[in-house]
Image (cartoon, helix red, strand yellow):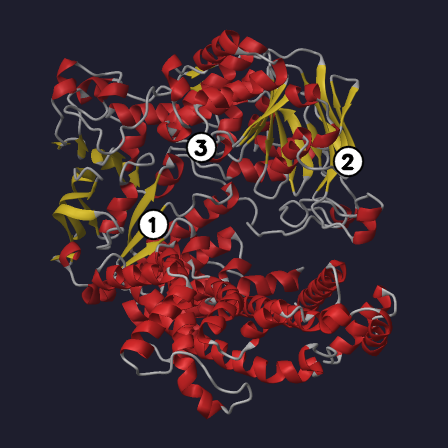
Amino acid sequence: MLFLIIKRILLGLITLFIVSLITFVGTEILPGDACTTYLERQAFGEQLEACYRRLGLNVPAYERYVSWAVNAIQGDFGYSLSGEMPIKEVLGPRIKNSLVLASAAIFIGIPIALILGIVTALWRDKLPDVAISTVTIFAMTIPEFISATLLILIIAIWLEWLPGIVIVPTDVSFLELLPNIILPVIAIAMIMTAHMARMVRSSVIQVMASEYVQMAILKGVPYWKMVFKHVLPNALLPAINVVALTIAWLLGGVVVTEVVFNYPGLGRLVIESISNRDLPTVQALAIILASIYVSINLLADLMTLMLNPRLKTLQIRK
Amino acid sequence: MTEIIQKVKNLSIGFKSKKGEEILILRNITTNVKKGETVGIVGESGSGKSTLALAMMGYVKHGLYTIGGECEFNSSNLLKMKNRDLEKIRGRKIAMIPQNAGQALTPNLKIGYQIDEALQLHSDLKEEEREQKISELLNKVRLPSPETIALRYPHELSGGQQQRVAVAMALAGTPDLLLLDEPTTGLDVTTQAHVLELLNFIAKDTGTSMVYVSHDLGAIAQVSDRIIVMYSGEIVLEGPSRDILKKPIHPYTYGLLKSIPKLSLAGLPQSMPGSQPQPGTMHRGCSFFDRCNFSEEKCKNNSPQLEYLEELNTSVRCFNYKSLMNDNQVNQTVNKIKTSLQDKEILNLSEVSISYARQKLLDQVLNRISDDNPTVKDININIKKGETIALVGESGSGKSTILKSIAGLLRTKGGIIKFDQDRNLSSDLKERDPNDLRIIQLIFQNPDESLNPNHTVEEIIAQPLKLYFGLKGEELKKNIIDLLQKVRLGEFYMSRYPRQLSGGEKQRVAVARAFAAKPDIILCDEVTSALDVSVQAAVLNLLQQLKEDFGTTYIFVSHDLAVVRAISDRVAVLYQGRLCEVGPSKDVYQFPSHPYTEVLLGAVLEPDPDIKPKLVAEDIVEEKPPQKGCSFQGRCSRILGDICKNEVPPWQITNSGNSIRCHIPLKELQKDQIN
């Protein structure tokens, strides 16, 4: 068991290493570099040399990779080009803002998804299932930039209940931010919740049709006790991985939604730094997003391992 | 007359087809179960026997519904009862023992909890009392060290142990009626015999009534007082167990009994033509009409009623039962198998060992397999051209593993596989040339999985013809039709897909595909296990006929010892991946010498209430072969002592050519059989 955890963590680290290598190589082979972008037309002669020296670009690529990696591990991603601020300081508030957005979506979305999924499965083919399933399938098929635009149109412009776009400074306090995030959270949570609800539904239906549930009924176990003891623990186990994948997928969704709402989070930073050719920031963002992705999947794997008695003993025996 | 506890009256259950037609699974069933009685319900798959058993608990599967009739228990109709009231009857008054305990126990709950749940629901015991009761119950079903078993999860137990837990769970509510749905199907022969013996003991001990559902007449014969035979949703015969098995007066039962291979009779049983009609395809007239040898003109358009014969205490659904009554016994005639054995050796396994152990990285790099105690070891078999050799043993004995290595699907750890005396066959598929691949073909257990569902029968059979012989166009088609005829399927089957075929037909297609390659050796891996008894006989007869026509050699793997007896020339008995006994089937079956062979053969159930299984050894489960000594030492009842534990037994050869691997001297081994 312990061995397995260590193995998984190691695999995760190797993945991150490969991601960092790919982004580094990617930024290397692109024509131009930070200095040419920064100096624009003055990018020649003495000035360029000075810039190279200042940013440490005059040493061979592998040396730069090593020193970049060593610093990155310590949380130092170097300097951003726009404004020459340390990337660490640029990222800090952005990460916080995106985290607020994503976790709000997750904390609202997961419970709703579970409830909807379980309800539709237990009342399969009856009115609650038909109604909810229609809505979820509809929600799944609308991309978030459309639902976000529609939300802005209806709630912000027609009803004027909430602000349509976020015009606050990046390092604003949480309370001030709150009214601004309601619409983005709804936009993100909608599609994610619908996805998860469908997964939970099919998982519960599958377990309900299993022989051990039939056996529990034939044993005389009351309906709700059967649902909570025999069905849900077994049905939700595979759902953990689905939830993890959805959260990972959320990272992409956040980018789009943040841009639509002009929200000062990581997603918008990705778009901004790409269009500014701010390569050190892109590099840092790639590694951060990859680490989030890897750690969420790792967490989900470990949770499944923990909760599934079958996997647990299997590992001990071996 | 004893008290009736369950009454089924005019019960019909069915479902609505996509076209909106009502399709019946059960048709107008009327029967009852008396107090303290064990009723066996027997029938082939699709006969509605499980649906009937579940209805007796007031349970109708999702998608099915009750069309009419009642299941009366304590004078209330279970099928009309509210769920809340049913919860008080299920588990307490009527309990179920499921077919596959491995899947019927909830995987995330400990054994102890699952039994405790039944106790909480159906008894007033306090917590400590319940704990004690759990131990008592586990003891009653003869599980070793109940306290530790209670703390385990279902997957940590063996199949036999899981089935015992299911029995304990059913007994927790002290029910008046136990329903058993194929409770021993899927267990090893020895385990099956032990579980049946346990059930018999419980029936006597507690006076519980039982309804025992099975396709296996052998198991039914051991437990039932009364037998109900079902065919396409109807009761066709019902009466005292002994009469039904010895003097069946319904043509279906008669044919069924004839098609079961027996241990005492070498040779192939007679098969019944055709297969059971699918639900919904029923016409007027008797449902067995197409397959009946006794049918008359009136059977075609009039369906017979269930008629009660007072003097026999039997009900029968047939116009013609009288002609069967005079035919006093099931005189089983068998088609003797002709041995086309030649003296030429075709396949030789010497010192073959196979290991499933995961390779260490270093070994992978050095391309070697290291495992000092491999799953299969010391296999030496010499197979002659035209021979049918059977590998038998319980699950885990390595019989399928050896097949895989011969086929080149599993790398051996050591040893040589030699074809035709001089050609070494690599156990790695990639190192074999196309001709090596052609000469050995496989037929799998389950044709549903071995035939590509997206290919027509034509494409399936064409593949080996194109691959090995490069046939095209008219010639290819002619060959396919030829092969289909050989397996007794018409030309019109060519355009069909596997899902449009019955189980027996699918297996015939698989046989045709194997023969298309014109192989020298065909490996048969449990080829009849997924088939109904009546179809099994037909497939066995077909295999035998083809063998005589083509002079093919069969290596036949089966857990069913009666089937092996019917078809094989020679038997190799395996335990834990080691050979115990090899010899001509005639001798092995008549004079089983090795202690393990005795155990295996003793546990076989025959459809005859007078032949009881002999339980020689305990059915403990061994996970790994012992490091040294005899492989069977852990379960042997005749163990001699340290010699068996430390030294691998030598081969001893009898006069009739049996090789036995045992430390007990031959004279003693043979002496015991006479007694």
In the rendering, at what x and y percent does residue B308 appear?
13, 33
Badge 3 marks a residue whose secondary structure is: loop
Q: Which mark is residue B180?
A: 1
CA distance for labels 2 and 3: 49 Å
In the rendering, at what x and y percent does residue B517 appear?
59, 17
Would you name the residue on which mark 3 appears? B453
- Mark found first going from the N terminus, 2 or 1: 1
In the rendering, at what x and y percent does residue A233 appear?
43, 68
- Residue B234 vs B617, above or below: the answer is above
Q: Are marks 2 and 1 on the same chain?
A: yes
Q: Residue furthest front?
A: A41
User: Is residue A120 found left or right of B469 in the rendered image?
Assistant: left
Badge 1 marks a residue whose secondary structure is: strand
- Mark found first going from the N terminus, 1 or 3: 1
Nearer the viewer's eye, disc 2 or disc 1?
1
Nearer the viewer's eye, disc 2 or disc 3?
3
Would you name the residue on which mark 2 appears? B650
CA distance for labels 2 and 1: 44 Å
Q: Nearer the viewer, residue B310 or B147?
A: B147
Query: What is the chain letter for disc 1?
Result: B
The residue shown at (38%, 64%) is A146
Q: Check disc 2: other Cα within 10 Å, few if <14, some if 14-19, many if 20+.
A: few
In the rendering, at what x and y percent does residue B148 appear?
54, 68
- Residue B388 vs A219, above or below: the answer is above
Which residue type carries mark 1?
Answer: Leu
Give residue B351's quadrant in the image.
top right
Q: Does the CB distance between marks 2 and 3 fall below 8 Å? A: no
CA distance for labels 1 and 3: 34 Å
Q: Check disc 1: other Cα within 10 Å, few if <14, some if 14-19, many if 20+.
A: many
Badge 2 marks a residue whose secondary structure is: loop
